[in-house]
Amino acid sequence: MSEPTIKPRWIDRWRARPAWHWWWLFILPATQRRPIALLDGLALRARAWVAGELGVEQPAPLRLWLWRVFVLPDSYAYRHTKILWRIIRQAVMWPIYTLLRAWRPVQHWLDLQIDRAAIGDRMDSAALALPTLTLGWRLLIAVVCLPLLGVIVSTPLQPLDQALFAVLMLGLAVFARQMPGKTARVFLLTLSLVATLRYLWWRVTVTLPYNEPVDLAFALILFAAELYAVTILLLGYFQTAWPLGREVATLPANTDEWPSVDVYIPTYNEPLKVLRPTVLAALGMDWPADKLSIWVLDDGRRDDIKRFSEEAGVNYLIRPNNFHAKAGNLNHALQHSTGDYIAIFDCDHIPTRPFLRATMGWFLKDPKCAVVQTPHHFFSPDPFRRNLGMKDGEPAEDMLFHGLLQDGNDFWNATFFCGSCAVIKREPLLEVGGIAVETVTEDAHTALKLHRRGYTTAFINMPQAAGLATESIADHVGQRIRWARGMIQIFRTDNPWRGPGLSWAQRLCYTSSMLHFLYGIPRLIFLLAPMAYLFFGLHLIATTAAAIIAYILPQLIHANLANSRAQGHHRHSFWSEVYETVLAWYIAVPTTMALINPKLGKFNVTSKGSLVDSSFYDWGIAKPYLLLIVINIAGLGFGVVRLLAPDNPEVGTVLLNVFWVLYNLVVLGVAMGASRESMQLRVSPRVNGEMPVVVYRIDGQAIRAQSLDYSMTGIGLVLPDGIDLADGEHLRILLPSDDDEMAFNAQVMWRSERRVGLRFENMTLRDEANLVRCTFARPGAWYTSPVVNDKPWQSLVRINTLCWQAYSQLFSLVPTLWRLRRERHHSSAVERT
């Protein structure tokens, strides 16, 4: 009996076609070749028409196609090029638009048929029931799921099969992304986990060039950076999978049962204008006066701070030395105050009146609670927001940690003490020896010690205080260097995986926050890795371009979709790369040295309240970005040369590296834009805030207006139609405060249609206290405005726009720099003569 004929699969026939190769796109086949299908015939005619329009005579190498398209079209084809590419663009986009139009009614029908909110609630309820399962059920689930995960991760697939599998996974991800609830978020994170582990398995088993020692050495460096990035990614998933969303715990109705609180405000070299609002706001907090004690801890030993403290009626404390910086200052105060709890505010963090009411309830509800932390919120723009001109609705750089990671840590009882805007219970703090002094990040280390003793911590995700952000990109870099060094010091001296007292979840959360600051070297590797191939021809990923796309693209898309869902309200897509690029060069060495010798480094104070007289490039900060830009531009040039080389068999590999370099240049461009300091001339930062205001003129006329913004020196208003105030006119304005109103003297400083700017005048200390009560310290003052939810594609467009603006500003300096160089050269020549 003859063997049965096995009919090849359609996918195998597709792969076997010559059209599968990229040359099919550019090189016309021999004229004697007979088309084997209708599509071939149409494709031949289309390519021939495009070649004729561009003036490309066949056969022609790829470099001629690229030259005609991007550099210098043939004189005959020049007038046709614009029309040609308009036709090509429409031909490409028409199917996409058609599919989108066809999908909209389907999606509308699905929205009517599926109650996503109800499904999300049921999924969340089912997920919350999982911890109640018996040990047997948990083991059964593990026995079923873990082998299945191993099979999915380790099954080898050809590029096209892998692409089809990726499409299936992405379809599930898109569906899950539209579902509300935390379980859908966890499902997205799980899909990303599968794609990431599958990519790692493929990298280890397929792509490392084991037979080429030089290639292998550089490939292992890149793989180590990828392995670090994946580790941080997965640890971040663990932290953000299920934010707790803790509510405020109520206090007893009888205020006699409320405990006593000491308020510590440490200061060193900050100006008095920064400290005054914080002290006045602390005095106005809603807490029994006999149970509230305010302490100004002045390590600068300044007479003006002492006089103000005496005038305000608060305790003023200094010490004979500045040992251990802020931690030593706080520990010294512990020896002089007696309150049951200690609220700590940096001298620029202005608390709202209900701060203690919002935080103290959890201490009474949970006797083991040692720390209640609230978010750090900033009413002045950080260097990124100011220098890059970020819009309202775009989350600030600090929001990811203070808005999401801390909330996620709270689910695992791993909330960190952040040094300010927090309350600590005195007894547990004394039990661990006070504020930690072994590292320069005393706050996180103190929380770690408390967790080791079995105490709990809590996070209330509602801003109850606000302060000043770092004034410049240099200050921001210096602050982050200290944080990075301190967290690595903790990792070396008090490693969360050594010693008793921590749960496995707490160990993972601490490890994630500590290892995160090691991103300096991996980020630099990613910025330089393409040059290994473009400069020297080294293959760091030893496989075809099609395979690389089939494996790495799904992993990147899944990671972006998962992070967009989990972090979308706290950080938009692609911004983490920008923030890391700005800092990578500067934290790489300090963190490495801290790993080697954790005793290196000292505490540095972040300056606050300074002014920027004019816009300028901080070249001291920008030099590394310029160097990396030059290297990547050189790599781009080498890539173009390789593309135009005749008979290049690795065009796909070259194109992948070129795209990698282009992405690096986009990120580096935004980093360069962040180093251009914008002008900041306001003595007091303005805070956006709308509230009803009553304005009284000298003749007694009352005008009801609306505030736009305010500061400690003035307020901006919108007047009703038909009202005109004169420049320099003196007024009396009333600002709301609970059920009362506070009156202030003001003068008109400028006008613009219905908008006016007023400056407060003749302000006494009592007036300042009342102003703080009505503005900075009013309840709900820092409930942030809604952040625009992340849309990865729009975020990518936004990043590219900022990149283009940054390069435009940079290149606009070239004529000026060239002129200055010529003037210096001329001056030197004159001096020599």
Image: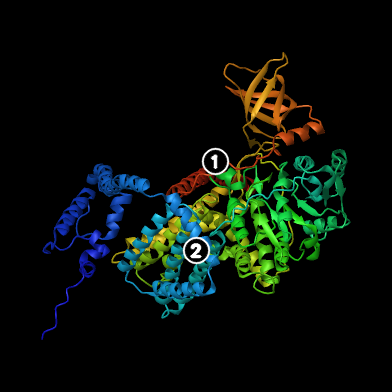
Q: Can you say which quadrant of the picture contains the N terminus?
A: bottom left
475 or 316, which lies in front? Answer: 316
Q: Residues within 10 Å of mark 1 (few under 14, many from 20)?
A: few
Q: Provide the secondary structure element on which disc 2 rests.
A: helix
Give x and y (percent) for residue 293: 83, 47
Determine the residue positioned at 67% across, 56% down.
Answer: 458
Mark identifier at residue 526: 2
Query: Could you tell me which residue is drawn at 29 percent across and 51 percent down?
Result: 69
Disc 2 residue type (three-letter): Phe
Q: Nearer the viewer, residue 297 or 726?
A: 297
* Residue 349 in view, yes or no: no
- Tell me the colour scheme of the image: rainbow
Using the image as rendered, state which of residue 713 and residue 818 is in the foreground. 713
Q: Is residue 310 visible?
A: yes
Q: In which image quadrant can residue 282 be found?
A: top right
At 62% from the left and 46% from the top, the residue drawn is 382
> In terms of depth relative to the viewer, which is nearer, 832 or 815?
815
Looking at the image, residue 255 sits to the left or right of residue 825; the answer is: right
Write down the residue under mark 1.
392
Q: Position of residue 792 (x, y in %)?
A: 45, 51
How many residues crowd around disc 2 within 10 Å: few (fewer than 14), some, or many (20 or more)?
Answer: some
